[in-house]
Each structure stands twice: as C-alpha cells, then as structure tokens.
Image (cartoon, rainbow, N blue to C red):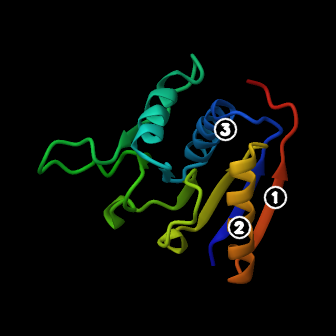
Amino acid sequence: MTQIDFYVLPDTTLEARLDFACRLAETIQRKGYRLHLHAEDEAMARDLDERLWTFRPDAYVPHALLGDEPAGVEVDTRIPVTIGWQTPPSPDLAVQALLNLAPGIPEWFSRFERVAEIINQHQDVLTAKRECWQTYKKRGYPVKAHQLRGQPG
C-alpha cells in the first residue's frame, strides 16, 4: 500500500514550498528512488525545472520536464526525476515516488510506493492539504506528518 508523508513547513510563501520540494527531490533521488514532481500547472512545473538547476550551487538533480520533448522523442528512462502537471509519467519510467504539489490528489497516486505532500502555512495550501489528508485517511492509507522547524535555506 502507498505510504503517504506530509511535510509541514513553518513558512507561508510559495518560494519556501518549492525550495523545500527541490531539497526533498534531491534527497529522494540520492536514496535511489525514481521521483515524479506533480505540479499544479505548467508555470509551476517550469519554475521547478529552473529551481532544480539553481536551488543549491553544489547540487545536481538530473531531471526532465514532461511534455517538453520534441514530437516522437521519448523521455530517457534513465532520468531519475520527472516534472509534470497533467498526466502521470509513463509506466516505462518505473517511477516509485510522487511529490504532489497540486492542490488535489491525482487519481493515479496509488501506483507509487511513496507519496509526499508539502504543506506550508498559506491558508489556501492548508485548506487543500487538510482535505487531502482526510481523503487518504478515509481510504485507509498510512499517513505520517513531519513537522519541520528552522530548515536551512
């Protein structure tokens, strides 16, 4: 059964949420998991794509933005991190973990071993992610909260 982890940030900004998403993506990828970052929309996906290059000067997270490849070209199955906003990554990519940054739960979430949700103290995010928490719990998924305090930038 899919394990759900909620990371609760003390910050209120979208920037803090996306910066933490980059750090978490790096950690997940370093542990050997293949990861898909599910963004709210194309603008957020493109922002994440840029941030993964720049969030830390000494970091490199190999990634691909789904939907950006030329017609007829498939995403390299060796890429450990993908970013998208519409559809799930191809099963050929064998992704094991989902980092969901969209307000709702993608209907295809249960195909992953792990799902991470990031909550910050912005009211819209709090409201949306409370609903997600309740939905996961109602469906019987194991859910764990991680309260983060004073994380370095």
Image x and y of residue 82, in percent: 42, 47
Disc on the earlier residue, 3 or 1? 3
On the image, numbered disc 1 is attached to which residue?
145
**Is disc 3 surrounded by few (<14), some (14 to 19) or many (20+) residues within 10 Å?**
many
Quadrant in the rendering for residue 57: top right
Instruction: Tell me whether the residue at label 3 lies in contact with that at label 1, contact meaning CB atoms closer than 8 angstroms.
Output: no
**Is disc 2 surrounded by few (<14), some (14 to 19) or many (20+) residues within 10 Å?**
some
Image x and y of residue 24, in percent: 64, 42
Q: Is residue 35 above or below residue 62?
A: below
Q: Is residue 118 left or right of residue 72?
A: right
**Disc sitting over residue 17 in the figure:** 3
Instruction: Tell me whether the residue at label 3 lies in contact with that at label 2, contact meaning CB atoms closer than 8 angstroms.
Output: no
On the image, numbered disc 2 is attached to which residue?
131
Q: Residue at x 55, y 45 (%)?
A: 29
Q: Residue furthest top?
A: 57
Q: Residue at x 57, y 50 (%)?
A: 101
Image x and y of residue 6, in percent: 74, 56
Select label 2 or label 1 by which is in front: 2
Name the quarter where the C terminus is drawn.
top right
Which amino acid does the dot numbered 3 rest on? Arg
Q: Is residue 33 left or right of residue 144?
A: left
Q: Residue furthest bottom?
A: 139
Which amino acid does the dot numbered 1 rest on? Ala
How far apart are the two marked residues, 3 and 2, measured between alpha carbons? 18 Å
